[in-house]
Amino acid sequence: MHSGKVSTLRGTGMPQGYGRWIRRPNQLLRIAPSALSCTQRCTQCDGVGPLEHVAAAFLIAGWRDWCLECDDADLPIGDGSAAMFSIPRHGEVPLRHVGAFDVHLINDRGGTLWARSAASFHVRSEWATPMGLEVWEAGASSLSACLKARTFISSEDYCQARLIGMLRGCGVGQGRLLGPATSADAMELARELGVDPAQEVWTGGAARMNGECAAHKVLDLVGDLALWLGFLPCMEIEMRNVGHAQFHALGRRLLSLS
């Protein structure tokens, strides 16, 4: 993923019931849970992605179903937010009750996600950064604020990803690169970029909003659930330092109830 190849993307909202599709030269691919993966630092369907940002943009604009036309499997990411898609508003965020559930997930970094059924939708996201703990909260009616939140990565994770062949086509301006450096590889990267390795934000400048990192995780959550379900479940969700693996696990669990 993120090969750096120039690609184009055109999205069209479709009538409810049409489903979610990807159209490529000589291929029409229906987005199905069985084809979703999140092993490349983003969500893909049969190798096409990243999909989570555009999926979130459609769902927050009120579209359950849509079609993406693209000329390459490596989709553009712009500045790492969903604001670039400018999806026209179609209605309210699609919400649905799926029955009673109480899901608790953890990851190997100590992150936690707790989701439980509720009368409506509310999310509280926390993300620990070198600058301190960020918090961002929203209900269904205020989710659109997360569309402008950019993706981010620590300098250490960025260096590790590059070592294993990922993010080769990503520019450091396509999101926010966060310091400080704690390894020789990250120190070398700081020298290449001409930034102070002790600096907390290396690229991207000031945050666009309070809790931008925490808000971007909500964007990823909404996009992943849009791909898995086509709607947002009525739930209360609290999460801290989690990502796509946990969002896919939640989607899988909720799909079994819907």
Image (tube, grey):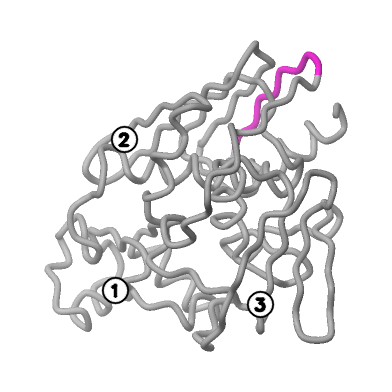
Gap between marks 1 and 3, in whole Å? Answer: 39 Å
Q: For the C terminus, which image quadrant?
A: top right
Q: Nearer the viewer, residue 111 or 225?
A: 225
Quick one: label 1 or label 3, which is nearer the N terminus? 3
Residue tagged by mark 3?
70
Q: How many marks?
A: 3
Which residue is painted at 73% across and 54% down in the image?
14
Q: Secondary structure at mark 1?
A: helix
Residue at the image point whose x is 32% and y is 44% from the top:
212
Above or below, 161 against 61 in this view is below
Q: Main secondary structure of the magenta part?
A: strand
Please tell me how crowded label 3 is: few (under 14), some (14-19), or many (20+) other residues with Cα within 10 Å: some
> Of the numbered discs in the image, which one, if any, rests on residue 184?
1
Q: Residues within 10 Å of mark 2 (few under 14, many from 20)?
A: some
User: Magenta span covers which residues?
Assistant: 99-106
Give the residue type at disc 3.
Answer: Cys
Binning the other alpha carbons within 10 Å of mark 1 as few (below 14), some (14 to 19) or many (20 upward) gives few
Residue bearing the label numbered 2: 134
Callout 3 secondary element: strand
Residue 121 rendering spot, x and y as whole percentages: 58, 22
Q: Earlier in the sequence, mark 2 or mark 1?
A: 2
Q: Residue at x 61, y 16 (%)?
A: 120
The residue positioned farthest toward the top in the image shown: 119
Q: Quadrant of the N terminus?
A: bottom right
